[in-house]
Amino acid sequence: MSKKRNKRPAPRRTEHQDRNTTNPKVVKTTGSRQRPTPQTRKKTKKNTPADMVFGRDNYILMIGGLVLIIIGMMLMNGGEMADPNTWDADSIYSFRRITLAPIVILLGLIVEIVAIFRKSKPAETPALTTEG
């Protein structure tokens, strides 16, 4: 009694795969992905001010908007009654808490939006001067 074996044919290698296997700058891995050797890997460069997403002015505006939001929250704070047995609507529904504080908070949020969407100016490089 002979057992029949189902033999699958070996997968074909493409030209691309043949070319990568002979490349000494590529390390073989167990998967299909090949990674570069440490000698050929690019060095990471340090961030310069020109590479940053936001400029100095953007960060100053963001801090200003955050300060306005905090001031608005502080204006809304409070509300303890002098006497717990009496209700004083003027201390709860005052102009400062109902009108002024939300306006200051909204101004802070608008400043934050402007700070995020404002394009930062490119860093200026000092001009070379020739003496002579």
Image (spheres, rainbow, N blue to C red):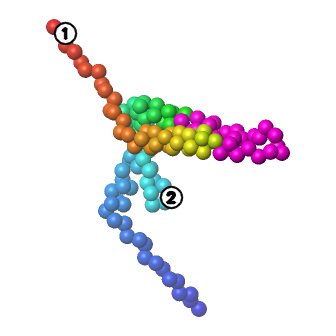
Give the alpha-carbon distance from disc 1 to disc 2, as whole Å: 62 Å
**Label located before the other in sequence (1 or 2):** 2
Looking at the image, which residue is at 25% across and 20% down? 127
Question: Can you tell which mark lies on residue 30?
Answer: 2
- Judged from the image, the secondary structure of the residue bearing numbered disc 2 is loop
Q: Is residue 38 in sight in this rendering?
A: no
The quarter of the rendered structure image containing the C terminus is: top left
Q: Are marks 1 and 2 in contact (CB under 8 Å)?
A: no
Q: Quadrant of residue 123?
A: top left
Question: Can you tell which mark lies on residue 131?
Answer: 1
Looking at the image, which residue is at 43% across and 39% down? 115
The quarter of the rendered structure image containing the N terminus is: bottom right
Query: Where residue 60 sits in the image (x, y, percent)?
Result: 46, 31
Q: For mark 1, does the 10 Å Cα neighbourhood hold few (<14), some (14 to 19), or many (20 or more) residues?
A: few
Residue 88 in the figure: left or right of residue 14: right
In the rendered image, residue 77 lying in the magenta stretch gets the answer: yes
Q: Amino acid at mark 1?
A: Glu
Query: Where residue 90 sits in the image (x, y, percent)?
Result: 68, 42
Looking at the image, which residue is at 50% across and 58% down? 30
Question: Which residue reaches farthest bottom?
Answer: 1
Q: Is residue 91 in sight in this rendering?
A: yes
> Residues in magenta?
68-93
Question: Can you tell which mark lies on residue 66?
Answer: none
Q: Quadrant of residue 20?
A: bottom left
Front residue (pair 103, 93) = 93
Q: Amino acid at mark 2?
A: Thr
The number of numbered discs placed on residues in the rendered structure image is: 2
Q: For mark 2, does the 10 Å Cα neighbourhood hold few (<14), some (14 to 19), or many (20 or more) residues?
A: few
Query: Where residue 82 sits in the image (x, y, percent)?
Result: 79, 37
User: Is 102 situated above or below 129?
Assistant: below
Query: Where residue 83 sits in the image (x, y, percent)?
Result: 81, 40
